Image (cartoon, rainbow, N blue to C red):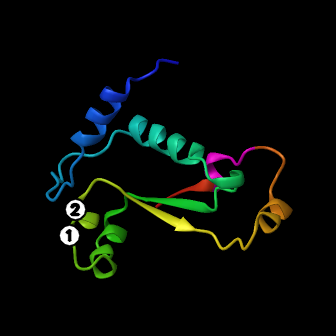
């Protein structure tokens, strides 16, 4: 695995910006979505609990409903896909581990496509 210098990392992180207008003729390629889903599934948390689930919304009829619950912003409706991060209600590590399989969660258990 290649390492990144601190300067390069900071330069890449400083590049980001908020997108306000989307080109509705462009869609995120399937291969890029699959990579994003892999990254989401592998996102670490304390104690390895990963107390979240992600919902990837690409269906336009569902995205059309999002401004109502997004302070009337049009971006969730206009973008190619919207990713919702949903917190799961585990009260403790014991709650999570009581229902956790022995192996890492499958992508289909963490990512829901709509």
- Label 2: how many Cα within 10 Å (few below 14, some 14–19, many 20+): many
Please tell me the numbered disc located at residue 74.
1
Q: Nearer the viewer, residue 2 or 63?
A: 2
Q: Nearer the viewer, residue 98 or 45?
A: 45
Query: CA separation, marks 2 and 1?
Result: 6 Å
Whole-percent x, y for residue 111 in the image: 56, 54
Q: Quadrant of residue 11?
A: top left
Q: Which residues are magenta?
A: 104-109
Task: Point out the residue furthest to the top here.
Answer: 2
User: Residue 14 vs residue 32: left or right?
Assistant: left
Q: At 22% from the left edge and 73% from the top edge, which residue is drawn?
A: 73
Q: Which residue is mark 2?
A: 78
User: Residue 60 vs residue 34: left or right?
Assistant: left
User: Residue 10 vs residue 15: left or right?
Assistant: right
Element on which disc 1 rests: loop
Q: Nearer the viewer, residue 47 or 78?
A: 47
**Marks 1 and 2: in contact by CB < 8 Å?**
yes
Q: Nearer the viewer, residue 22 or 71?
A: 71
| Residue 71 within the segment the image draws in magenta | no
- Label 1: how many Cα within 10 Å (few below 14, some 14–19, many 20+): some
| Residue 105 within the segment the image draws in magenta | yes
106 shown above or below 113 = above
32 shown above or below 80 = above
Whole-percent x, y for residue 22 in the image: 17, 54
Q: At 52% from the left edge and 47% from the top edge, which residue is drawn?
A: 40
84 shown above or below 25 = below
Whole-percent x, y for residue 68 in the image: 29, 82
User: Residue 25 vs residue 99: left or right?
Assistant: left
């Amino acid at each position: 695995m290649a390492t990144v210098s601190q300067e390069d990392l900071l330069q890449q992180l400083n590049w980001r910006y908020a997108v306000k207008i989307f080109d509705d003729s462009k869609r995120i390629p399937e291969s890029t979505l699959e990579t994003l889903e892999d990254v989401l599934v592998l996102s670490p948390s304390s104690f390895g609990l990963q107390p979240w689930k992600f919902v990837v919304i690409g269906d336009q009829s569902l995205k059309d409903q999002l401004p109502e619950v997004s302070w009337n912003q049009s971006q969730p409706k206009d973008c190619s896909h919207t990713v919702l991060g949903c917190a799961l209600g585990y009260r403790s590590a014991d709650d999570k581990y009581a229902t956790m399989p022995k192996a890492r969660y499958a992508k289909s258990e963490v990512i829901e496509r709509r």
